[in-house]
Image (cartoon, helix red, strand yellow):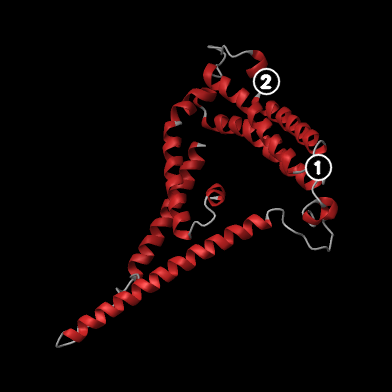
Amino acid sequence: MDIWTRIRPQATERELIIVGRVWVLCIVAVSICWIPVVQAAQSGQLFDYIQSVSSYLAPPIASVFLLAVFVKRVNETGAFWGLIGGLVIGLCRLLPEFWFGTGNCIFPSDCPFLVCGIHYLHFGIILFFCTSVLVLVVSYCTEPIEDQHLHRLVFSLRHSKEERKDLDWKQEEKGRRARRDAEERMREKNDNDTAQEEENSGSRADQQDTPEASETRPDIREDPVWKYTVDANALVMMAVAVFMWGYYA
């Protein structure tokens, strides 16, 4: 949603809902296609697979977040290149492991020891420190963020009483203005269409001998019986899901 609002700042709420639903369908399709990769990685152990992927992708995010909170000198450039560098390092371990396989005691993997010889949890620690070094080096080589944008956002300025100005307030205001203009144009169009329909219906009613009965809106109130039935089914499904997850974890 953040990416789409940057591409189309004037996107309406309906458009954002449609984009979100389409993206969910794409993610589901990718997840289904990813099942063979899960079976090939970590000897088919789902728990080990989840932990290994987290160790390859999560440390850069944790590093950037912690440094941004506790080190005032960290800026956007350092955070960006830290995330990119951490992602590249994680993929350099993730992709060869999927290609060669993790192997086991009976059938060892052909993956080079320099790449796959380190346990994925230890690799996560190394990746965290490498990302931290990259973020600090790039941040100290570029311009810092002014304090007026950091009040009560970093640890050293947590007690500041000064007014904070957002870095991207101009872009956010531009997006809000574009969405507001688009909604106003849509509202004016709907009002014009409604007025035209009322005018046409009034002229038709005048031409007829007897006035037609106005259309009533359908009753969308939910039957309490079905409401309680759906709620009960939701509780049962959640209980079954929790049991299955705990039993097979």
* Mark seen at residue 143: 1
Amino acid type of the residue that numbered disc 1 sits on in the rendered structure: Glu
Q: Quadrant of residue 32?
A: top left
Decide which of 236, 205 is in the foreground and name it.
Answer: 205
Crowd band around label 2 with a 10 angstrom C-alpha radius: few (<14), some (14–19), many (20+):
few
The total number of labels drawn is 2
**Rendering coords of residue 79 (x, y %):** 72, 40
Which structural element holds mark 1? loop
- The residue carrying mark 2 is 118
Q: Quadrant of residue 194?
A: bottom left
The residue positioned 41% from the left and 54% from the top of the image is 236
- Indicate whether 30 appears above or below 111: below
The residue positioned 40% from the left and 60% from the top of the image is 232
Residue 215 seen from this side: no
User: Left or right of 243: which side holds 51?
Assistant: right
Crowd band around label 1 with a 10 angstrom C-alpha radius: few (<14), some (14–19), many (20+):
few
The residue positioned 44% from the left and 26% from the top of the image is 36
Between discs 2 and 1, the one toward the N terminus: 2
- Indicate whether 249 appears above or below 182: above
**Rendering coords of residue 5 (x, y %):** 54, 52
Residue 89 seen from this side: yes
* In front: label 2 or label 1: 1
Give me the C-alpha separation between circle 2 and circle 1: 37 Å
- Indicate whether 190 appears above or below 203: above
**Rendering coords of residue 153 (x, y %):** 77, 54
Decide which of 48, 176 is in the foreground and name it.
Answer: 176
Which structural element holds mark 2? loop
**Rendering coords of residue 124 (x, y %):** 68, 30
